[in-house]
Image (spheres, coloured by chain):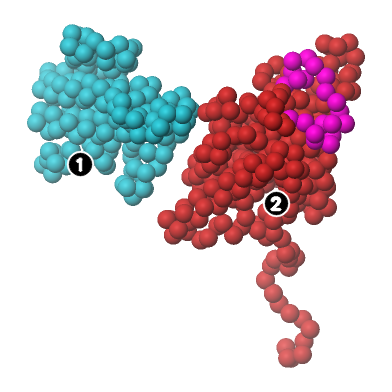
Amino acid sequence: MNENSNLRISFYPHIRDKASTSRIMLDVAISLLPATIFGVFNFGWYALLLILVCVGTCVILELIWDLGNHKRMTIRDLSAVVTGMILALNLPPTLPLWMAAVGAAFAIVIVKLLFGGLGQNIMNPAACAKCFLMICFATRMNMFVYQGVLSTPPIEVLRAGGTVDLLQLFLGNTSGCIGETCAVALIIGAIYLFIRRIIDFRIPLFFLIAAVIYIGIYSLFTRGGIDMTLIGAHLLSGGMLLGAFFMATDYVTSPVSRPGRIIYGAFIGALVCTFRLFGTANGSVCFAILLGNLVVPLIERITRRKSFGKEE
Amino acid sequence: MSEKKDNIFRRLYYGVLKENPTVVLCLGLCPTLAVTTSAKNGLAMGIFTSVVLILSNLFISLLRKLIPQTERILGFVVIIGTFTTLSQLFLQAYFPDINEALGIFIPLTAVNTVIYDRAEKYAVSHNAALSIFDGIGMGIGYTLIITILGAIREILAMGTVFGYRLIPAGYSISIAALAPGGFIILACIIAIANKINGGRRL
């Protein structure tokens, strides 16, 4: 073989990509920015403080963990930042700071690091921490102050049988958790994620389709016809979009196979509606995602590809 | 292990650390999780179980030649049940409030797996002196963990330890007093114990 040969021998992989964990997490963080900014605009500077406390607690605790266990610096992959942001967006805007810090600590230390860090956690840290806070501090987690007045978030209004203004829900001028009120901001973030090909469309799509079908059937039986306003109001309120686009699509805790993702999305969507229509409304998305996370191994089992000619 | 190499210090060491009944053998978790809502309850339950464990270990060891191999479980039940009843009567007479607080878990000590495990694995095949120290070691190990668990849950849920306030009122994490909190904190203690023991050894 002469020196000038164009033939080169190299080992696989031959197709490479610049995607890395930190780049993906940065994209997720960017996609959460519209909702974050709107949350601060809607609820005031205290909301920003709450977000900073959550993110700060997550990052500092992961740093301490890495230093204490002589591990590689895992905070550079930005997953702690994303966990903190998602958790903060799921909190009511007047939650005391120490409660938010306890929630963030639970998310990072108990749910993520004790299971072995990013990629090993069986549950979504942010969703699990929200459920933890819902159980611990039920009173404060169900207390929503909007524009200085104690108010009921739209999802609770719906549950009580009232009606809500769809346009206001869409624009986000309502009470609720910091990041869940503005549907426009969440959709902008989701579009960014789709364009960057960070998330798979199957999980959110079937999540929302299952919810639409479920509420449609429910309204058929209870209100004598498919109530589009009710469906719209449920889709736009109570963190449904936040859960569908940003929490259910978490790489670590969602199925790998495509049919598995469809089952997983539809399962969570149906669960959310079950909780909302027959149980408690606040936090229903997080509880549903948590249950969805736990059945992922089973979903992976039934959707595993078989080798040709082999029987299970 | 042979009986020659075994000695009382080895028994104590194994009971407290190497074969700790709660965090290494994972035995008797039902009372461990149920009564440890406060450090005082945990300590009381630990001491109660230890007393029954030491006495039943002693008597099973003394009677090991008399108990037929095939009916040994029956023998254990009679001996352990006797000491549980005696200890409960003592508790009712002198510490009625603790008896009230621990409730059904006092009579349930008669079916505590820690005691049966030690009877089956140790007392039935070793002499009385070693069996007593096995009971003491296991009892200390059990009491230690159950008290620590109770103390942590009490700090988090009420801000106090043995009734002394450490954290100002209003900063309580109520989940610690509920079942999930018990499981999470016990799991954390088991993780730390595994780290100390250098990996899981069963």
Asked if A208 appears above or below A163 in the picture, the reply is below
Q: Answer left or right for B111 relative to A90.
A: left
Q: Is residue A104 visible?
A: yes
Percent position (x, y) of residue A14?
73, 68
Residue A94: image quadrant is top right
Chain ID, mark 2: A
Q: Which of the numbered marks, if any, corresponds to residue B13?
A: 1
Q: Residue at x 43, y 25 (%)?
A: B177
**Is A157 a magenta residue?**
yes
Q: Is residue A302 visible?
A: no
Q: Residue at x 71, y 77 (%)?
A: A9
Q: How many marks?
A: 2
Percent position (x, y) of residue A154?
76, 25
Q: Indicate the secondary structure of the residue bearing disc 1.
A: helix
Residue A121: image quadrant is top right
- Give the color of chain A as drawn: red
Contact between labelled residues 1 and 2, with CB atoms less than 8 Å apart: no
Q: Which residues are magenta?
A: A156-175
Residue identified by numbered label 2: A29
